[in-house]
Amino acid sequence: QERPVESGGGSVQSGGSLRLSCIPGVSPVRVYCMGWFRQAPGREREAVALLNPAADAIYRDSVKGRFTISRDNARNMLNLQMNDLRPEDTAMYYCAAGDLYEYNCGLGATVRSWGHGTQVTVFS
């Protein structure tokens, strides 16, 4: 199992959009619990969105309706579409791989491998 590799971060004005992508380091991605986490300076890392092997997604309340987690089974990749970004979304975003065939893939899911992170900065 290799470490996930994220891409797609950057700086954007409040209300803008970014799309993060992840090469997950596991294959096939569709049978794993996968997720996106973030950590802002001085704060603990928190789960943002997770996707189980049945493609059921769960989001933290603050991003519901703005963020969408998805996977591309053909390309074996995980994505996070982030719309209507706010300054409080500023953080390092991490892709994470959990357990194989873990359908109980919630915000407290066990993470087996972390990516290095990609920075998202939202300015007002």
Image (cartoon, rainbow, N blue to C red):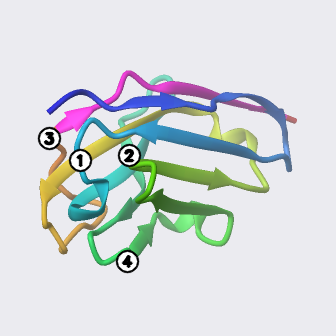
| Majority secondary structure of magenta residues | strand
Q: Looking at the picture, does residue 75 appear above or below residue 100?
A: above
Give SS at disc 2: strand
Q: Which residue is mark 1?
A: 27
Q: Looking at the picture, does residue 102 appear above or below residue 108?
A: below
User: Marks 2 and 3: in contact by CB < 8 Å?
Assistant: no
Q: Which residue is mark 4?
A: 56
Q: Which residue is mark 2?
A: 46
Cα separation, mark 3 vs mark 1, equals 14 Å
Foreground mark, 2 or 4?
Answer: 4
Q: Of callouts 3 and 1, which one flags the residue occurring earlier in the amino acid sequence?
A: 1
80 vs 43, nearest the viewer: 80
Q: Which residue is mark 3?
A: 112
Residue at x 63% of width, y 30% of height: 9
Give SS at disc 1: loop
Q: Of callouts 4 and 3, which one flags the residue occurring earlier in the amino acid sequence?
A: 4
Quarter holding the C terminus is top right
Give SS at disc 4: loop
Cα separation, mark 4 vs mark 3, equals 19 Å
Cα separation, mark 1 vs mark 4, equals 18 Å
Residue at x 37% of width, y 61% of height: 50
Cα separation, mark 2 vs mark 4, equals 19 Å
Q: Amino acid type of disc 2?
A: Glu
